[in-house]
Amino acid sequence: MARRSDVLELAILGLLGEGPKHGYQLRKQLNSMLGTFHAISYGSLYPTLKGMLAKGWIAEDGPADAGAPALSGRRARIVYKLTADGKEHFQTLLDDSGPEAWEDERFNVHMTFFSRTEADARLRILQGRRSRLEERRAAIRGSLSRTRERLDDYTLALQQHGLEGVEREVRWLSELIAHEESGGTRRSVDSEGR
C-alpha cells in the first residue's frame, strides 16, 4: 500500500506544477483534493515540504509578501516552486501505473492529474483500479452470501450499500477505459457543469 507521504508528495508536486504556492495555499488545495477524511495538517505538510526541499524537487521562491510592510509578530509566508528535478520526479510518479497507483487515496490523487499523464499509463491505472475493485466486489459478495442470515438489518444494509458503491465505481471505470481505448479525450467541464 502506498505510504501517505508518497501520496502527499505526488499531490504537492502536481499543485506546484500549476504555479508557485505558499504552505497555506497548498494545505487548502490538498484538503480539497483529498477530502475531509484525509485532512492534511501543518504537522505533516511542512516536514514533507522540508524533505522535498532537501531532495531538490522544490525550491523556496522567497516570501509571499515580500515588499509588504512587516506585521508585528507575523512571519513571512514562504512560497514554494517546482524545480526541474521536481518536474522530472512528478512525471515519473505519474507514469507509475503499478499496484500502488490503484489504491484508494493514490488513485484519487493520480486521477486529479490525469490530464498530465500519458495515455498508456492512464489506461493501465484505470484497468488496474477496476481489477482491484472487482476483487473487492467478489469479496463483499462472498461475505454477504456466507453471513447474510446472521446480520441484523442495519449491518446488512450497510454491507449492501458498500457493494453498490463498488459496483457503481466498476461501471464508471469501465466507461473511462472504453473511452481511453477509443482514443477519446476528456473535455473540461465549465463552471455550470456542461
Image (spheres, rainbow, N blue to C red):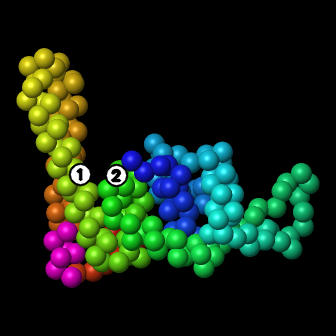
What x and y, as percent, mark residue 46? 67, 53
Circle 2 residue: 103
Check if residue 178 falls in the magenta segment. Answer: yes
Answer few, some or many: residues within 10 Å of disc 1's Cα (few below 14, many 20 plus, some between 14 and 19).
some
Q: Does residue 49 lie above or below 145 as drawn?
A: below
Residue 62: name its quadrant: bottom right
Residues 29 and 10: in front is 10
Q: What residue is rendered at 19% in x and 55% in y?
A: 131
Q: What residue is rendered at 52% in x and 71% in y?
A: 89
Circle 1 residue: 132
Circles 1 and 2, Cβ within 8 Å, touching? The answer is yes
What kind of residue is marked 1? Answer: Arg
Q: What residue is rendered at 70% in x and 70% in y?
A: 59
What x and y, as percent, mark residue 25? 63, 61
Q: Is residue 17 left or right of residue 52?
A: left
Asked if one can make out residue 154 in the rendered structure from this viewpoint, the answer is yes
Instruction: Give the magenta part as a residue range.
Output: 177-183
Provide the major secondary structure of the magenta segment.
Answer: helix
What kind of residue is marked 2? Answer: Glu
Answer few, some or many: residues within 10 Å of disc 2's Cα (few below 14, many 20 plus, some between 14 and 19).
some
